Image (cartoon, helix red, strand yellow):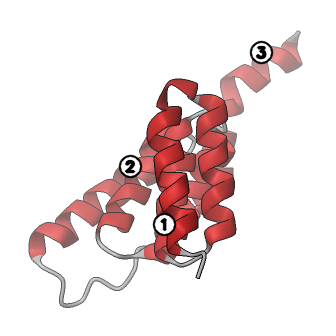
Amino acid sequence: MVLLVSYWILEPFVLRIIHAADIPEMPDLTGYPAPVVELIEHTYGETMDKPYADDIVGKLAMVYHANFFYEPAESCYGIALALNDREWLWYYYTALIKEELGDTKSTIENLQNVVEIKPNLAVKSQIYFVFTLLAHHD
């Protein structure tokens, strides 16, 4: 019983340490507009405060992705998925970044996960799936 209570109390701290170590460092922001730098710095700070929250880590991934920092974005999407593999958004955004990087196989796999988790989005995902296949079928 004491062990269970100790785990319950310490779990957030342990998870914070484990996942904070996985968060990629901020990219070099030299030369970027001040609003972009501020957004990335703010979102990074939020993420380091709650690196165990998939929605927070996923938000950092989206900020990186929107600003063409593909490597850290991909890393953060992976961490968000590790934290919550039932959130269809992380598969969807991973599919988008994989498609942008030309990785058709991973794009398709991630979109298939979206369809499995969120069948009511299947029509949109299947259309994207077909266009991905057609675009890379040369």
The mark closer to the camera, 1 or 3, is: 1
The disc labelled 2 sits on which kind of residue? Lys
* Residue furthest out toward the top: 1
Q: Earlier in the sequence, mark 1 or mark 3?
A: 3
In this rendering, position of residue 2 left or right of residue 39: right
Report the disc number at residue 97: 1
Q: Is residue 94 visible?
A: no
- The quadrant the C terminus occupies is bottom right
Neighbor class of circle 2 (other Cα within 10 Å; few <14, some 14-19, many 20+) is many
Image point 12% across, 78% down: which residue? 33
Q: CA distance from mark 3 to mark 2?
A: 31 Å
- At mark 3, the secondary structure is helix
Neighbor class of circle 3 (other Cα within 10 Å; few <14, some 14-19, many 20+) is few
Question: Observer-nearest residue: 97 or 138?
Answer: 138
Q: Say which residue label 3 marks.
A: 5
- At mark 1, the secondary structure is helix
Q: Earlier in the sequence, mark 3 or mark 2?
A: 3
Q: Position of residue 137 (x, y in %)?
A: 60, 75
The disc labelled 1 sits on which kind of residue? Ile
Q: Is residue 26 visible?
A: yes
- Quick check: marks 2 and 1 in contact, CB under 8 Å? no
Neighbor class of circle 1 (other Cα within 10 Å; few <14, some 14-19, many 20+) is many
Question: Observer-nearest residue: 123 or 44?
Answer: 123
